[in-house]
Image: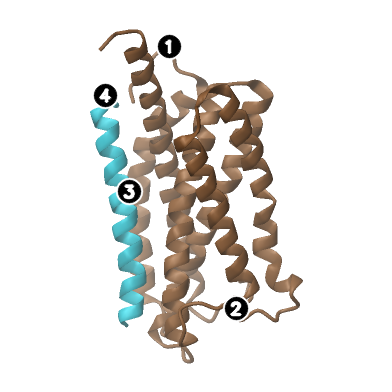
Amino acid sequence: MSYLIASYGITAIVLLGYAWSLLSEHRRLGGDG
Amino acid sequence: MSSDASQTGLERFAARTRRPLGWVLLALLAVYAWAVVRAPIDAVQGVIQKILYVHPPLAYGAYLGFVFTGIGGAIYLWREREDWDRFARAAAEVGIVFCTLMMITGPIWAKGTWGKWWSWDPRLTVTLLLWFIYLAYAVLRSFGEGGARTARFAAVYGIVGVLLIPLNYYVIEIFDNRSIHPDNIERGSLGDGMGLPFRMGQVAMFTAFAWLLLLRFEVETLRGRTAQAIDRGGP
């Protein structure tokens, strides 16, 4: 079970973190403005 | 990114598509999570087999990223349009993220089923090579001198790198199934109740890939405009 949680957990954290960093930079550079 | 007359068709497409695609993605992720939770427990591997619903979709996302890198590079060479170079660069980065996650979830699954994190098996070795090739692409784009010369070299590099994808996919058959890695999944090869979560995993990851690619492309475009404004001495 721990291997399963690690696989989905790492995938979710990395993809969410990546999306968050891109959205932050997008906003900082004046996107959607 | 707001729409204006100076945007290229590709930039307008990204600006118009990304937001609605984000809402579709949220809905798909909810259905995907439900399908994975409801999926039957495999009689041989147990619950760890459910990594099947995330590991191959990540691999397909990585393939897609590297194919788009090649396509973007080819169109850049053909039309000399700088937006396609930005698209190729964005696709490579998103592809690397998916490939890295594939390289993480694979060994976790291997440890749980084979008892070891890694094996120098043909599929795993070619996948590692693919990962290194696109990491090198990213390093080239980050530390290269920039400009048209680097973009042209990166385009050719990205097109040549695509050749490794069919080798990566078919390497198990090429080595006559002597690989420790399971065979490629074919229609009807999954057990009862496993088809829906597998397809949902593919659809959700493809949509996540597309949304991230459009967002990364917009960021690359905004970076370019900011750099141009600084060069002109503007804000």
B19 relative position to A27: left or right? right
Secondary element at image label 1 = loop
- Which colour denotes chain A? cyan
Q: Which residue is mark 1?
A: B5
Q: Position of residue B125 (x, y in %)?
A: 60, 68
Residue drawn at 35 percent across, 76 percent down: A4
Q: Chain of mark 2?
A: B
**Residue A11 placement: quadrant:** bottom left
Q: Amino acid at mark 4?
A: Gly
- Residue behind mark 3: A18
Seen from the viewer's position, the closer of residues B110 and B118 is B118
Return the disc, 3 or 4, that comes first in the chain's sequence: 3
Q: CA distance from mark 4 to mark 2?
A: 47 Å
| Number of the label disc, if any, that sits on residue B182 | 2
Q: What residue does disc 4 label?
A: A30
Chain of residue at mark 4:
A
Residue shown at 59% from the left, 77% from the top? B181
